[in-house]
Amino acid sequence: MKRWLAEGSWCAAKAQRPRALDGHEAWLEERFRRHAGNADVVRQEPAAELRIAVSLRTVERAGAHLRQELRAEPRATVRFEMRPGQQLQIDFGERRVAIGDQMEKVFFFVATLGYSRRLYARAFRGER
């Protein structure tokens, strides 16, 4: 308040001081994913690799958004459950494979039951 009165008008806040892990965001994200969000394990690596000594709290603050993403990822995929006999998924595909000494194009038919995930697959020489 005193500074504001001394200035006589509004003034912008002072710029934040640089943080120890500024510029290492990609490195930090890769380490958080590698160690499943364990900040204490990640904290031990900057000293050896980046020659930076940081506290556990610094790593926790820098990686808070990454830990939140790691917790949300498993919940983002919801398995679609079926009753027995309710659904059959059919897919077609093709692939070049070696038959003898020649590369041949092979076409695949794959059927998967929704409930049991049982699979039926068959290869054909043509699509007909």
Image: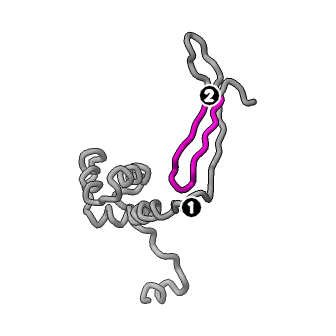
The location of residue 103, given as percent across then percent down, is 61, 16
Task: Please name whichever residue, 128 or 22, is drawn nearer the observer in this view of the structure.
Answer: 128
Residue at image mark 1: 82
Badge 2 or badge 1: first in the primary sequence: 1
- Residue furthest to the top in view is 101
The location of residue 43, given as percent across then percent down, is 27, 56
Task: Please name whichever residue, 112 or 106, is drawn nearer the observer in this view of the structure.
Answer: 112
Indicate the secondary structure of the residue bearing disc 2. strand
Bounds of the magenta segment? 107-123
Quarter occupied by the C terminus: top right
Instruction: Name the image quarter holding residue 16.
Output: bottom left
Residue 6 falls left or right of residue 48 = right
Q: Determine whether 13 is above or below 121 in the image.
A: below
Which amino acid is tagged 2? Arg
Residue 50 falls left or right of residue 122 = left
Q: Determine whether 66 is above or below 51 in the image.
A: below
Task: Please name whichever residue, 120 or 66, is drawn nearer the observer in this view of the structure.
Answer: 120
Nearer the observer, disc 2 or disc 1?
1
Residue 44 highlighted magenta (yes or no) = no
Residue at the spot 42% in from the left edge and 54% down from the top edge: 25
Quarter occupied by the N terminus: bottom left
Q: Determine whether 56 is above or below 109 in the image.
A: below
Residue at image mark 2: 95
The location of residue 58, given as percent across then percent down, is 31, 64
Which amino acid is tagged 1? Met
Judged by its main secondary structure, the magenta piece is strand
The crowd level at tag 2 (other Cα within 10 Å; few <14, some 14-19, many 20+) is few
Q: Which mark is residue 48?
A: none
Residue at the spot 26% in from the left edge and 55% down from the top edge: 41
Residue at the spot 63% in from the left edge and 19% down from the top edge: 104
Instruction: Name the image quarter holding residue 85.
Output: bottom right
